[in-house]
């Protein structure tokens, strides 16, 4: 049973229209990715601490573990903010659910490869989620379920981008992690998406 909860101030400050759209978007993403696992979504009002943390604290996802059999998604929203941004953040987290349910991501293992040593911005699951979250949100805004070919293209493009990342890192001798991230993200077209 999939559920959506409005908590920590969002239940009072989001109007019924925004709540309906977020609930509808969550249901749409479950259908887009043919997710059969249980997904519980928590929409929470952004706190002062989250505002100070910036973009990295807009949302998170945890996968099923031995103590529970459901995915948990939490999206922090500014109730007066852009509904489009809220849906895009939700789409980002549903991409992570999709990655797990399709078997590509488990903990920090991507398709059998340990990616723990990669910085956040260059982890393949984040490359995919950042690059395609607006596109996935657009599926909702257009009330459209993408074809299997469209979803396969997302996966192929992620594979291609990650191969570029690995190739560049192997041949790189940059002096700082920040330079590596900025250069690699720019080379694979993620700089603007990641805000680098």
Image: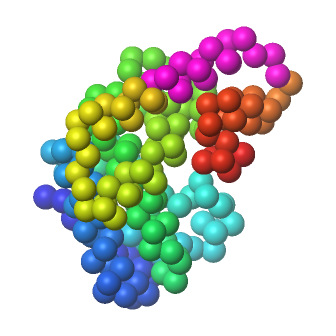
Residue 101, picture quadrant:
top left
Residue most extreme to the top = 171
Q: Is residue 172 magenta?
A: yes
Q: Is residue 181 above or below residue 30?
A: above
Residue 181, picture quadrant:
top right
Q: Nearer the viewer, residue 71 or 95?
A: 95
164 to the left or right of 154:
right
- Secondary structure mostly taken by the magenta-highlighted segment of the chain: helix
Q: Position of residue 133 (x, y in %)?
A: 44, 50
| Whether residue 52 can be seen here | yes
Q: Position of residue 196 (x, y in %)?
A: 72, 46
Q: Nearer the viewer, residue 31 or 67?
A: 31
127 to the left or right of 173:
left
| Whether residue 76 can be seen here | no
Q: Which part of the image, by quadrant, shows the N terminus?
A: bottom left
Q: Is residue 97 magenta?
A: no
Q: Residue at x 69, y 35 (%)?
A: 186
Q: Is residue 166 above or below residue 108?
A: above
Q: Position of residue 146 (x, y in %)?
A: 26, 46
36 to the left or right of 79:
left
Q: Residue at x 53, y 78 (%)?
A: 81
Magenta stretch: give its range.
159-174
Q: Residue at x 37, y 87 (%)?
A: 15
74 to the left or right of 46:
left
Q: Position of residue 179 (x, y in %)?
A: 80, 32
């Amino acid at each position: 049973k999939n559920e959506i909860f409005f908590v920590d101030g969002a239940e009072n400050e989001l109007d019924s229209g925004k709540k309906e759209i977020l609930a509808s978007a969550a249901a749409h993403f479950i259908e887009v990715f043919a997710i059969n696992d249980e997904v519980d979504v928590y929409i929470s009002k952004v706190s002062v601490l989250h505002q100070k943390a910036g973009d990295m604290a807009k949302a998170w996802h945890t996968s099923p573990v031995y103590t529970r059999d459901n995915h948990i998604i939490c999206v922090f929203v500014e109730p007066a903010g852009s509904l489009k941004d809220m849906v895009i953040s939700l789409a980002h987290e549903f991409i992570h659910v999709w990655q797990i349910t399709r078997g590509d991501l488990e903990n920090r293992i991507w398709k059998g490869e340990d990616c723990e040593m990669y910085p956040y911005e260059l982890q393949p699951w984040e490359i995919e989620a950042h690059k395609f979250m607006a596109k996935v949100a657009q599926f909702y805004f257009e009330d459209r379920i993408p074809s299997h070919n469209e979803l396969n293209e997302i996966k192929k493009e992620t594979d291609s981008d990650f191969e570029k990342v690995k190739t560049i890192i192997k041949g790189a001798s940059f002096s700082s992690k920040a330079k590596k991230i900025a250069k690699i993200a720019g080379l694979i077209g993620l700089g603007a998406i990641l805000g680098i």
